[in-house]
Image (tube, rainbow, N blue to C red):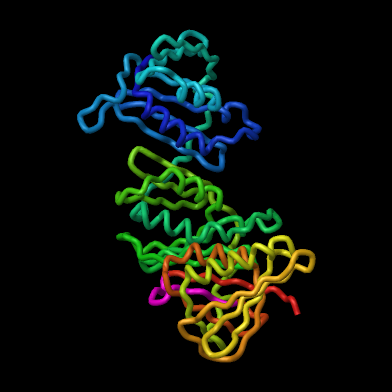
Amino acid sequence: MKFSIQKDRLAQSVQDVLKAISSRTTIPILTGIKIDAGTEGIKLTGSDSDISIESFIPREEDEMVLADIQQPGSIVLNARFFNEIVKKLPSETIELEVLSSFQTVIRSGQAEFNLNGLDPDEYPHLPQIEEEEVFQLPTDLLKALIRQTVFAVSTSETRPILTGVNWRVENGMLTCVATDSHRLALRKAAIDTDSSAAYNVVIPGKSLSELSKILDDSQEGVEIVITENQILFRAKHLLFYSRLLEGNYPDTSRLIPAESKTKIELHAKEFLQAIDRASLLAREGRNNVVKLSLIGEDMIEITSNSPEIGKVTEQVKSEAVEGEDLKISFSAKYMMDALKALEGTEINIQFTGAMRPFVIRPMHDDSTLQLILPVRTY
């Protein structure tokens, strides 16, 4: 195998596939990046058997030559070293040549590296996905769906199913839900599909976080293919495979209260900043708790008390308050995460009592909500 390639494009592709490679893998060949040079261009693959990422660099794009392939072939190179080498090579062009017994020479400018490669035939094959049902999402919408839900997945392995985000597709609507059993994030979006297929799958939160980092903010669509145990996201020159989590995701619809006893409307940014300030003292205390109480007709009081450090009190004006009087305590971190995920400037919070879950929604937008369980402090 022998080819020369633009350094910038190679470095970007290496960065993308590196996100799938784990240093803790028990399969030695998976610490490597597989490089395939074919007639169409160069393909790089990284995998940790949960996530697999394939990045493609075409021979030419927009009438610019990116790669010159003199001899097709394949090799697997140590990902960590290859990444560092590519980043630090001196010239804008890199030449890569595989000699006998997988010895690989990388040349750029006056620099030459010799790396011991591995047999590409031993590299596991990527999942073969039957592409019967495909739907599309604009990249920016897909990134928003991930950003507004993935932070609420559980980080504990006691219930592995909760470390993923539940995606349900039915009647042209995609619903994404994440919960760690103390809070819940939900986002809905209409999808572009010709099929009437329905899905109910759970995608590992880690996979979605990595996918979001790789996707650039283009308006181009991402094609999504779901099978029994894999999901494939296909963007321009990029394939991202993830395994799905096994098991049934809990029915979270029962958690969302149908009616409320107290409603408040707030300016999201002001409220977020007030919670942020209150959390300065809450952090040191017991699990970061702040209290919210209604005072007067349209004022909200936020307090936090840490016996060793001190106390903070702040009042925030509400746009509107209706319903019963209320005192409630909750995690400042959960509230801040929820407020950052909601895109509305005005929000409405609906409470059904001091010990019941409460719901935060942007005003005039039914596609997204955040739910938080209060903390018992009385």
What residue span does the magenta drawing correspond to?
A: 358-367
314 and 16: which one is in front? 314
Placement of 220 over or under 311, stated as above or below:
above
User: Can residue 195 be seen from the camera position used here?
Assistant: yes
Image quadrant containing the C terminus: bottom right
Work out whether 78 lies above or below 295: above
Q: Please identify the residue farthest to the left as the structure is shown.
A: 63
Residue 163, x across and y down, in percent: 61, 55
Of residues 320 and 130, the one nearer the viewer is 320
Query: Quadrant location of residue 96?
Result: top left
Residue at (58%, 64%) from the top-left corner? 276
Q: Position of residue 371 (x, y in %)?
A: 56, 72
- Tell me where residue 344 sits by quadrant: bottom left
Q: Nearer the viewer, residue 76 or 220?
A: 220
Which residue is pictured at 63% across the width and 63% down the height? Answer: 180
Quarter containing the N terminus: top left
Q: Is residue 228 above or below residue 261?
A: above
Residue 38 location, x and y as percent?
34, 23
Q: Is residue 21 magenta?
A: no
**Residue name at image x 50 percent, y 81 percent:** 318
Residue 333 rendering spot, x and y as whole percentages: 61, 63
Look at the picture and state if 9 lies above or below 339.
above
Does residue 361 belong to the magenta stretch? yes
Frontmost residue, 179 versus 226: 179
Which residue is pictured at 41% across the width and 41% down the height?
239
